[in-house]
Amino acid sequence: MKPFICILLLLLLPKTSFSQEELVHSVYFEFDKFNLDEKQANDVVSFITALDTTRVESIQIFGYCDDRGKDEYNYKLSNNRANTIKDKLVSKGIKNKIIVTIEGRGRILLEEDIDNVSEARSKNRRVDVLVNFKPLPPPPLDPGVYDAIKPEMVVGDRIILRNILFDRGSSKLKLSTRKELDKIARILHKYKNLQFEIQGHVCCTPTFQKEAIDKDTKKRELSKNRAYAVYKYLVSKKIPARRMTYKGYGNTKSLGKGSEFDRRVEFLITKV
């Protein structure tokens, strides 16, 4: 089977709406191969050139392999796949300076309860081209949704933690995120009766995969791990564990306002 290309998250919102911050375009490869035919390669270029270039900030290219073979070989193969896409983009006029990452990430482990191993492996042999857009100002919050913990909250209120940020594909807390959580912990000590669920969310995954891959564990558990990282940090700041639960929702609860607002952590108030 020849490599084929699938455009993920291809819903480009009208200019009068909220544009997405990131789009993902995936190229799938045959087993143990990193070559492309000309038609498929031109489709990648067309995907990039069809975008609103005034908002494109950078392009990242990540290569992957299936779970077979030795790690050293898989890293080399995934890197070759990423460079194949980079070379094609550059040869067609895409400027090198906006391609900020070319990285082979090696193999993707199979999930334990996978039904179709062959299909899963074929989808793991790929390169993801991530187009990053310049951020837009946040939209107004819906009723019952806040950007900070406030007095007189009620059960069902949601707090979107806009300053709780993670590197792409990572659940590790950054220094800036730890400082923000320190502020949140001080507020939670003030409102001692609040109980809440910590909800992790992700954007930019294929529609057939609700959860994203954590690059540190190589497993599809990123939103859960991000929620747990926040939970664990708050416990370390003496917030009682009985006040909190945590859960990963993957890409199942999109705000519909652009991917930059879907890559988030929320608190859902469960008891006041």
Image: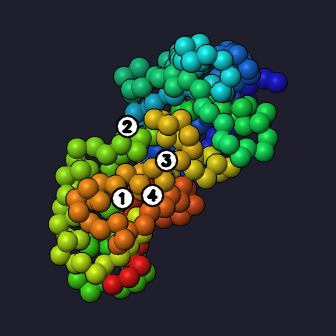
Q: Name the residue under label 4.
A: 200
What is the number of the mark on residue 231? 1
Q: Earlier in the sequence, mark 2 or mark 1?
A: 2
Q: Earlier in the sequence, mark 4 or mark 2?
A: 2
Q: How far apart are marks 4 and 1 (CA)?
A: 11 Å
Q: Which of marks 4 and 2 is in front?
A: 4
Residue situated in front as seen by the camera: 206 or 227: 227
Measured along the vertical axis of the image, is residue 100 above or below residue 151? above
What is the number of the mark on residue 57? 2
Mark count: 4
Q: How far apart are marks 3 and 1 (CA)?
A: 14 Å
What is the number of the mark on residue 17? none
Residue situated in front as seen by the camera: 173 or 2: 173
What is the number of the mark on residue 222? 3
Q: Quadrant of the C terminus?
A: bottom left
Q: Which of marks 3 and 4 is nearer the N terminus?
A: 4
Q: How far apart are marks 4 and 2 (CA)?
A: 26 Å
Measured along the vertical axis of the image, is residue 265 above or below residue 48? below
Measuring 61% from the left and 53% from the top, which residue is drawn there? 210
